[in-house]
Image (spheres, rainbow, N blue to C red):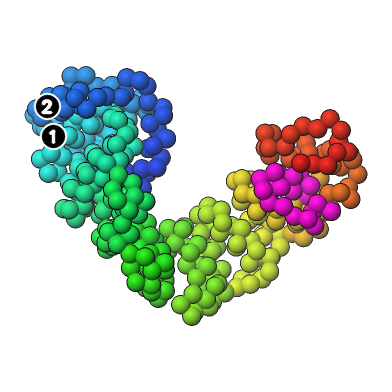
Amino acid sequence: MQSRAVILKALILGASVLVAWAGLATAQETMSEAAAESAAEAAKTALPEVTLKGPTQTPLPKLPEGTSPDAEFVYGVFQRGWYLTALALATPLAEAGDVAAQTLMGVLHETGLGIRQDPVKAAQWYELAAGQGDPGASLQLAQFHLLGKGVPADKKKAADLFEIAAEAGNPSALYNLALLYQEGEGRPHDENKARELLKEAASLNDPDAQYALGLSFLEGLSGVSDAGQGAFWLGRAARRGHTSAQIYYGILRFQGKGVEPNEQEAGDWFERAATAGNPVAMNRLARLYAYGRGRELDPVAAAGWHYVARALGVSDFQLDGFVESLDDETRLQARKKAEQFSATLIPEVEDPSQKSP
């Protein structure tokens, strides 16, 4: 069985995904607090009599004979989607002071899995666990204070909690703490300290930190400008799927700034971000197709990407003129091409000679 620390890290990092799972649960998976307390009482000595399957439909793990459920076992139950059972088992452990169980109770109340969503109670459980030095609970509670979710907004408190998680090597905490130093909120403004924290988070493969660090070198923050370092870190973030980094790195590749120029590779990065739905990348890709830079000259693809980008709010008067220069048949093909990317964004028009929206 995985160690409690590893399971906790995976749980905290995946908290946003768990919110989506909640919508998959059946009506049977919701439970009143009174019912939860009743089930928790039964759980003090054995597994609850009534256990409902979660959306994953994974079998309930077996509890070794003659043993009582501990936090590791409860996390196994939770990971398999048995949220009611996890709630019932975690409650007595959390009330007895088990820090991992307290963090799990925070997650259950935050996400609404197995119980009514309640950010106030989630914050209370996270605070109990954070008070015992738990870095995962500290990270979640810091986010609550940063956003004023379930607790009053307090960036100083958020920074203190991010620091606890950062000292444990959590890349998300390092990144958020760096931003507070950059903004001078919750911590004194200190670009050098911010870059130091960003470097640490980036070295742990946090794509947001890699992107922010790359920008800090390109924009000369803290008085240090280094296009090569900027391109290096943006490239790292781009390879990890960071859409904004893919666009910026594509621009650097196209211009040859901090990296060898390569227009074809620039087009590849724009295309990755464009197919992920980013309208700025769509606009950049349309320009490459329109002028045959990094892509074979293709008026249909150029106009098609331009239609979608413009429908998403990115205007380009130069490309407008390019599209106007095309014949009606080419514009019609481009419209069909655009509909392949997003059939709902481009409204149908009966007359192909009409201007695109």
50 or 72: nearer the eye? 50
Could one spot residue 312 in this view of the protein?
yes
Which structural element holds mark 2? helix
291 or 70: nearer the eye? 291
Residue 341 drawn above or below residue 27: below
Residue at horizontal 80%, vertical 51%?
A: 320
Residue at horizontal 31%, vertical 57%?
A: 154
Residue at horizontal 22%, vertical 44%?
A: 124
Q: Residue furthest front?
A: 152
- The residue to which callout 1 is attached is 92
Side of 259 where 117 appears, left or right: left
Mark 1: which amino acid? Pro
Between discs 1 and 2, the one toward the N terminus: 2
Which structural element holds mark 1? helix
Quarter-wise, where is residue 14 in the image?
top left
Residue 179 drawn above or below residue 329: below
Residue 206 drawn above or below residue 343: below
User: Residue 211: x and y, percent?
Assistant: 50, 62
For the record, the magenta segment spans 301-321
Q: Is residue 228 magenta?
A: no
Gap in Å between the C-alphas at discs 1 and 2? 7 Å
User: Residue 60: x and y, percent?
Assistant: 26, 26
| Labelled disc at residue 41 | 2
Residues tagged 1 and 2 counted as in contact (Cβ below 8 A): yes
Quarter-wise, where is residue 246 in the image?
bottom right
